[in-house]
Image (cartoon, rainbow, N blue to C red):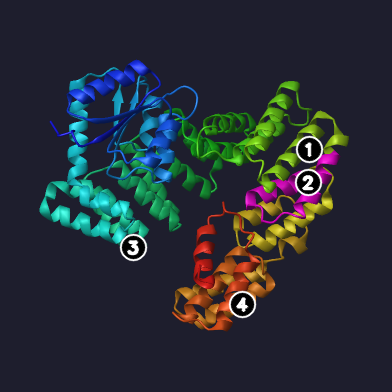
Amino acid sequence: MQDYSGKRFLVVDDFSDFRSAVKAMLREMGAKDVDTADRGEECIALCRHKRYDIILHDYNLGSGKNGQQTLEELLAARLISHQCIFVMVTAESGQAMVLSALEHEPDGYLTKPFNRATLAQRLDKLVERKSLLKPVLQALDKQSPAEVLAACDSLAQQDKRLLPLCQRYRAGALRELGRHEDLERLLHGVLADRAVPWAYLALGKLLSARNDLPRAREVFEKGLQAFPMQPGLYDGLAAVLEAQGEAERAQRVLEDAVRLSPLAIRRQMQLGKLAMRNEDFAGASKAYRSAVDQGRNSRLKSPENYLGLSQALIAASGDDGLDKRAQAEINQTLSELGEQYAEDQAVRLRGRLMQASSLQKSGDSVRAAQLAAEAVAGLQELGEFLPAEAALTVAAQLQQLGQAEAGTAMLKSCVEVYGDDARVMEGIAKLTDDPQILSGGKEAVELNRQGVRAYQLGRANDALELFRRALALQPKNISIALNTAQSLLRLGGDAPSAELLAECRACLDAVRMIPASDPRYERYQQLRRKAFGA
């Protein structure tokens, strides 16, 4: 048995008798420092002030955060080290519960009831594994992928048996370092030696990011043949199918994943989006409803789930008016949205428009028109770009609510900001046939494409000139502005001139309203730190 006398333990369970029983078991195993908590929120608070070596956390704690949501928070806030052992404990052994808990990758899983021998055996193995991997885990805590690679190489040389344990950490480090060719070679090598689900998932994602969709699809499908109980592989395949235009099949694949592991907010949210796209409004309502329910105590909650549920319920009514039950659910959903995101002006405006759409469906056209007019006035004062999907939804709502001019303005703004995104342009084409709007950004997009190609070929001056011309046509286009700023910084080297810096800052200021949810936001922030020195 391992020596537990110096380990710091935290036992989290809502039943005092169980906490006492586990604490007694740990005392018998030699533990001296054992804290307890009855809620996930208390666990998080304790972890802010003390570093624990081993946490035994019950999955279902009644009201408040469950074990999965607590682990999400601890990892996101870096309140536990990679060296900490987090064991999920539950009285439920059903497939859906187990898979949902394991998706967030706790170090171990224990089913109640268990005795001291079982607990000791499980913890001994976990402590031994963490001890062997200590140099790698220390490098992970330092957020140094280069040191992770070095530690993996060193451990594998010391003991070849550790190689399989190190490969996944090595893959993550290569991904963070952007060494994609090395990562692909590693993953192929792992799969050639033995099939493991994480390698299929990592390789599929790598190929998807490279837009090599046929190969990515093949990898995910092969992975699912070998590991049909891995929900992440379904997610990856669904994303590829959607990108290939097979939205209905993608929805079916995600539905299979949800049946396996239903307690995943992001999966339910993606299923809601796909179902809406496929006009399966009942399916969308169900998925978004689950996402709203699961998000109440989770850091992964999103206003999009509240708005998506409301939109699905409105769409489900078809040409008929909303029935009282649907209207009541929409009112409750939007009321909760307003409470949860009271400080978010964009969300409040979108909620008002959604309420107007529901009232119009219910026959209250006067109140609907009033709310729509209030929303239009607020949109004109909004201090950020709406995300692309949100902007398209708002444009459609404005058209339906009789605010044609405001709807047209929103579509023009979409072209200005997101006109390089083919899917956004497809969405715009569904809402208007105005050639001025549809062709508004074509020249700028083509110049940007040529600039990207020149940049990749190392022709920095040519690339910058092309980006400048594109930006003159579309100064609010996020991609073009970021490409121009990056080219200016590259041209300036370690000591860019005042002129180059000023131009770079102007580019970034033009798109300072980029929403934080945009996938390019982190790149924007990195460029801004370089340009402004902060």
Task: Between label 2 and label 1, give the one nearer the viewer.
Answer: 2
Q: Amino acid at mark 2?
A: Ala
Whichever of labels 4 and 1 marks the residue nearer the N terminus, that label is: 1
In the picture, the quarter occupied by the N terminus is top left
Q: Which residue is mark 1?
A: 356
Q: Which residue is mark 2?
A: 375
The circle on residue 305 is none
Task: Between label 3 and label 1, give the one nearer the viewer.
Answer: 1
Please provide percent x and percent y for residue 328: 72, 24
Whichever of labels 2 and 1 marks the residue nearer the N terminus, that label is: 1
Q: Residues within 10 Å of mark 4 (few under 14, many from 20)?
A: many
Q: Is residue 92 magenta?
A: no
Q: Residues within 10 Å of mark 3 (few under 14, many from 20)?
A: few
Q: Amino acid at mark 4?
A: Arg
Whichever of labels 2 and 4 marks the residue nearer the N terminus, that label is: 2
Q: Find the distance from the CA under tag 3 to the CA under tag 2.
A: 47 Å
Disc 3 is placed on an element classified as: loop
Q: Which residue is mark 4?
A: 468
Q: Find the distance from the CA under tag 3 to the CA under tag 4.
A: 30 Å
Disc 1 is placed on an element classified as: helix
Q: Are marks 3 and 2 in contact (CB under 8 Å)?
A: no
Find residue 443 and report its image quarter.
bottom right
Q: Find the distance from the CA under tag 2 to the CA under tag 4.
A: 35 Å
Q: Which residue is mark 3?
A: 179
In the rendered image, is residue 193 in sight? no
In the rendered image, is residue 324 in sight? yes
Range of magenta residues: 369-397
Name the side, left or right, on which 99 lies relative to 381. Answer: left
Disc 2 is placed on an element classified as: helix
Find residue 9 and report its image quarter.
top left
Task: Between label 3 and label 2, give the one nearer the viewer.
Answer: 2
Name the side, left or right, on which 359 lies relative to 194. Answer: right
